[in-house]
Amino acid sequence: MPTDHLSATFATLADPTRRAILARLALGEATVNELAAPFEMSLPAISKHLKVLERAGLITRGREAQWRPCRLEAGPLKEVAGWLEHYRRFWDDSFDRMADYLKEIQTKGDPDGRKN
Amino acid sequence: MPTDHLSATFATLADPTRRAILARLALGEATVNELAAPFEMSLPAISKHLKVLERAGLITRGREAQWRPCRLEAGPLKEVAGWLEHYRRFWDDSFDRMADYLKEIQTKGDPDGRKN
DNA sequence: AAGTTAATTAACCTATAAGTTAAATACAGG
DNA sequence: CCTGTATTTAACTTATAGGTTAATTAACTT
């Protein structure tokens, strides 16, 4: 739980239960009980995970009667993707060619006629 | 730390000191002392961080006399990138168009003549 | 052999993450 | 108003992350 945003996001994602919750939310909104159902864990445990996800900005929660529907918020994931980009060249062999290519279509326009 | 690979990677990346070490290693190999220099922290603390990075597969260490040159290993980062891809559509507005486009050039061949 | 530099290991401390059970809160409906 | 359902909070436990200082190992240098 360091203070910077990116660290908080990574720490939040470092738990398989929380990632599973995000995967479920990628399919659409869900209530706490719905989210808890697949797990052995107690409901308070899930509630805590949701609080962690919420503090990291990875979910938001609404209010509908006694339900608190959760929805995915991808902002922090975008930050992670941005951070990762700095390292892409270390694993992606085609990165350099692709970078050249993107540069080219950005300058000359897409050879197939699409806009970017 | 949980046992699965991805969790270990995220947990490892959740520390700003460790991310700074990776950023330094992106510039090239470095010894422990070189890596430690920018930080207030004690050398054993850095040594521990390096051990965490090594266990996560994010670095490897060689031996040259009394030095242990560290180098970046991007495999785990690639896994993170793969995981992230599942969520890209939640933040990237142009994702759908791009997916269509990539599909097309994969089928018809790159209009500019490159291989994929 | 003795000393110096590089790095790790050991022993320890403190904070907190992640789970538990039990109690509390919020709301809906008969 | 009372009851059931949804969810959170409280209090507590246990494990471990991340830092410290001091001691140790390893290899070069003189």
Image (cartoon, coloured by chain):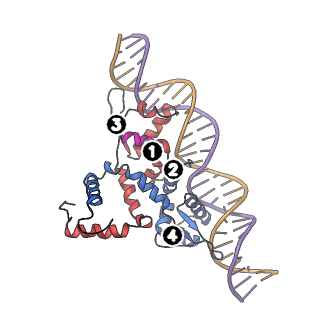
Chain colours: A blue, B red, C purple, D orange
Examine the rendered structure and indicate whether residue C13 appears above or below residue B79.
above
In front of the other: A86 or B7? A86
Q: Which residue is mark 4?
A: A38
Name the residue rendered at 28%, 66% in the picture.
B102
Instruction: Tell me where residue B66 sits by quadrant.
Output: top left
On the same chain: label 4 and label 3?
no
Tell me, for residue B19, which label it has, or none.
Answer: 1
Secondary element type, mark 3: loop
Instruction: Tell me, yes or no, whether the two marked residues, 4 and 3, touch with CB atoms within 8 Å.
Output: no
Examine the rendered structure and indicate whether residue A90 appears above or below residue B100.
above
On the same chain: label 4 and label 1?
no
The quarter of the picture where the C terminus of chain A appears is: bottom left
Q: Is residue B28 magenta?
A: yes
In front of the other: B98 or A40? B98
- Which portion, as a residue range, is magenta? B19-30
Name the residue rendered at 41%, 47% in the picture.
B56
Q: Which residue is mark 2?
A: A7
First in residue order: circle 1 vs circle 3: 1
Residue type at the position of mark 1: Arg
Residue type at the position of mark 3: Glu
Instruction: Tell me where residue B105 sits by quadrant.
Output: bottom left
